Amino acid sequence: MMNKKFIKGLSLAELKELCEEKGLPKFRSEQLFNWMYNYLVTDFDEMLNLPKDLRSQFNEEYILNTLELTDSKSSKYDNTRKLIFKTTSNHFIESVIIPDKNRVTLCVSTQVGCPLDCQFCATGLMGYKKNLTAGEIFDQYGNAQRISGNEITNIVYMGMGEPLLNFDNTVKSLSIFSEELTKGISLKKITVSTAGIAPKILELAETGLKCKIALSLHSCFDDIRTKIMPINKKYSLKENLDAVAFYANKTGTRITFEYIMLKGINDRIEDVKALVSLAKKIPSKVNIIPFNSLEHMNPSGFASELQPTSKSKIDEFVDRLRDNNVTVLIRDTQGEDIAAACGQLAIKY
Ligand code: SAH
């Protein structure tokens, strides 16, 4: 039996090449693109403007669906919904649909697990298993859009994994959203979040894909940041800040600085001062994130000592930032009861 190949995840240029190799007219590549990435069909037989024999030929040669929905959990308190998918390699990943007043955001994963070991994050505790393909990244959107009653308006690459350590597949998935043919979501509505892989931030700027980026900052001091995010040893704050400044300049976008509030670690007066001066140097906004518990993962060591900053202390911190004209948002903690909030995604193996 012939080994089937994946077709989901191929860019428009790659679909054109594929059609050329098969001696098919060029417009077939655009039809395939539309069926996969706009109409989100799950069966070649739904591709009605392809001749029937071509549909069955594709059916024999290619796998269209990269993910199988195995479970879904809805929050009792808000409309957050966590989707659990199985990949064809039998790994499990999670995506989260987060409805808000005027938008519906989808949070997608880019890796199974994560190699970074950030002390506050559940995904790090499960270790790294594999990179997701561009098709698997896209299919989280395809499935979520089909399941969700409402139009998904925004995508954040903030699920499991570090997108910039799966650079090629992340960029390929972004390039699908960037195509003129794509109707659903444009790059303006997509944010890629990174723990700070400076050289890859520069490389992303050079691709010309103008998505937004968020840097998981969490501290303005190298020694503290290294303690909570070991990757800071490899790529220092200065390297990352230079990289995001370059990115903002090159793409004309504003950087989001994500900042989890950790009691006694990054919520002191010197932290506010440092954050104010840093935010002023780069076109940016600050996203303050209440720390979500990792208790469901039974962390040990330093990770088990981390505590959230109190609500009143967070408000004080935010007021100080605002008094200094920093644009600040406090991120809603949605989906905590189903372990779908930021940093809570992990599959127990
Ligand atoms: N690897 C990428 C994307 C995944 S994390 C990154 O580091 O940015 C998405 C966001 O959730 C990051 O800002 C991350 O720091 C934050 N996060 C992780 N664990 C968290 C927790 N326990 N509580 C609140 N936010 C958390």
Image (cartoon, helix red, strand yellow):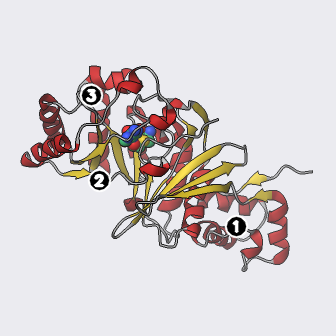
**Which is more N-terminal, label 3 or label 1?**
1
| Circle 1 SS class | loop
Ligand 1 found in image quarter: top left
Q: Residues within 10 Å of mark 2 (few under 14, many from 20)?
A: some
The amino acid sitting under disc 3 is Lys
Question: Which mark, by number, is residue 42?
Answer: 1
Q: Position of residue 28 (x, y in %)?
A: 69, 71
Out of 13 and 291, give the one closest to the viewer: 291
**Which is more N-terminal, label 2 or label 3?**
3
> Which residue is at a point 51% across and 30% down the rendered structure image?
125
Q: Position of residue 312 (x, y in %)?
A: 17, 44
The amino acid sitting under disc 2 is Thr
The amino acid sitting under disc 1 is Thr
Question: Which mark, by number, is residue 253?
Answer: 2
Cβ–Cβ under 8 Å for marks 3 and 2: no
Out of 154 and 168, give the one closest to the viewer: 154
Q: Position of residue 283 (x, y in %)?
A: 21, 48
Out of 120 and 161, give the one closest to the viewer: 120
Number of marks in the image?
Answer: 3
Q: Say whether residue 170 is left or right of residue 86.
A: left
**Which is more N-terminal, label 1 or label 2?**
1
